[in-house]
Amino acid sequence: LAGSAMLLASIGSIWSFFFLRWDELLLRGRLPSAVALVILFDLAWLTMFIIATGGFYSPFWALLLLVVVFAAMFFSGTSAAMPLTAFVVALIFVAMAGTLPRLTPTVVWAIAGRLLAVLLLAWFSWALCMVLERERRASQRLVRHLTEGVLLINYDGAVLLANPQMAQFCGMSMDELVGYRIFSPGTRVGDAVLRRMVSDVESRPRLPVSRDLTIEGRQITDLRCTVVPCGRLRGQILGWVLIVQDVTDIRAATRLREMGLDMVSHELRSPLASLRVMAQVLNGVAGELTDAERERVAVTIERETDRLSRLVADLMDISQVERADYTLAVTAVSVPEAVGQVHELYARHAEQQGKTLINEVPAELPEVLADMDRLVQIINNLVDNAIKYTSVGGSIWLRGEALEDKLSVSVQDTGAGISPEALGVIFEKFGQAPAEGSLSASARGLGLGLYLARTLAWKMHGDLTVHSRPGEGTTFTLTLPRADARPPVVTPPS
């Protein structure tokens, strides 16, 4: 009775670890190391039972193979698994050999043959599982280096596998994350974030589920969480894979695109409406207009068509300069010549508005490495903004200075200045400073000019900076490499 009970206990133990924990074997590929102690006790019980029922001549001798193969297979991830299994098996055989009445050469060869067969079978099982273990570790390395966060969760809600990116999202360490039970609420901030991510797992979904999540911390992070069921045993899901992707940049780009489309639509609608009204006026009362009224209508049409042209030109320039393969025709060009063109173009325009545009750029300045057309475009943009934001009676100065290996061109005005908050956005795409005084939204434009100007400056290995204080005016400074010096490489920030 004792022997039968020992046999049934050993077989029951093996059966329970093999079948009742089959889901863990499927998801992790191995059992916890603590199970090895139970396997050793099973070997001891079976050995005693086999010795009691005849040793090598016992009808239950083959049961040893079950435990040996089981140990070799499911502890392949442990480096000492195979040597320990071989040692224990050899010890068992020595113990059983000691129960024999006498050892003849035939018996010795029979024992050695059986021992060799058992060890070969154990080694073969161990080698096959080592191949699977290497594949498992390769998959773990792949998961560890993914930019997305990954969690493997079993049916009971225990985290079996995680990668560092997921730990970073949750604000937890890897040791805290692996083994964490998501159905047991925690009190830490990381626990709260993790529970929001895995909220869809609590309903144990049978189909993939995706949801968006925003985490507010030192910075706002937008996440996309996808829960995918994995592994099925007799129709039951064994666990889930949670994939978390950082979509903050994608969301920001989407919002920027939507904002840009809204602004472009608004900017197009306003001049088109004005042109439509003027067309109706000309169509209805063209013969009744006085010369002054006709001139006013013509001026309005010209102004609105110019505004449309600038809008389209800015959009086309942006699409060009943002291309990775866009290049400039960089040559040695004269800064005084470029500034002179801009001064000649805007001097009368500024005077008509009661403002003064002063050119103080020395004629003897050295040449710079730049694209002449784009250089004139940048200075045009800066001067146009300065005139726009300078009050009546104010002045705008154009200055130039030769530095050691660069040359700077500055545009200084006596306008209202820019607040520190606005300084952080004026160089961004569609970024605009708050409206000053009576300056209309249409006069301020799309907010592409300074973004385009700085991008062009970077592409010519230069830079565009601003210095301003409210009530003290604004100075924009363009720096470019001198033609007689080796140009420094300026890497634009991402």
Image: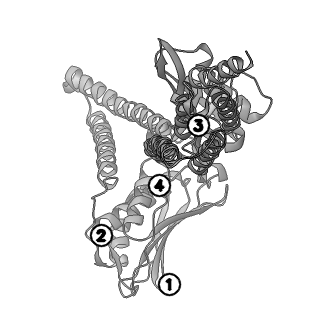
Quadrant of the rendered image containing residue 11: top right
Q: Mark 3 or mark 1: which comes first in sequence? A: 3
Q: Mark 3 or mark 4: which comes first in sequence? A: 3
**Tag nearer the camera, 1 or 4:** 1
Residue 101 in the image: state x and y as whole percent.
64, 40
Residue 317 higher or lower than 476, as above or below? above
Residue 391 in the image: state x and y as whole percent.
56, 53
Residue 224 is left or right of residue 91, and the answer is: left
Kindly identify the residue that appears in the image at 51 percent across and 28 percent down. Answer: 26
Q: How far apart in space, not on screen, are marks 2 and 4 (Cα)? A: 21 Å
**Tag nearer the camera, 3 or 4:** 3
Pick the residue in front: 210 or 450. 210
Quadrant of the rendered image containing residue 369: bottom left
Tell me the crowding category of disc 1: few under 14, some 14 to 19, or many 20 or more residues within 10 angstroms, Cα based.
few
Determine which residue is flagged by label 4. Answer: 385
Quadrant of the rendered image containing residue 181: top right
Determine which residue is flagged by label 3. Answer: 161
- Pick out the residue farthest to the right: 187
**Tag nearer the camera, 2 or 3:** 3
Colour basis: one colour
Tell me the crowding category of disc 4: few under 14, some 14 to 19, or many 20 or more residues within 10 angstroms, Cα based.
some
Determine which residue is flagged by label 2. Answer: 371
Q: Mark 2 or mark 4: which comes first in sequence? A: 2
Viewport quadrant of the N terminus: top right
Determine which residue is flagged by label 1. Answer: 403
Q: How far apart in space, not on screen, are marks 3 and 4 (Cα)? A: 57 Å
Label 1's element? loop
Pick the residue in front: 292 or 62. 62
Tell me the crowding category of disc 3: few under 14, some 14 to 19, or many 20 or more residues within 10 angstroms, Cα based.
many
Q: Which amino acid does label 2 sit on?
A: Asp
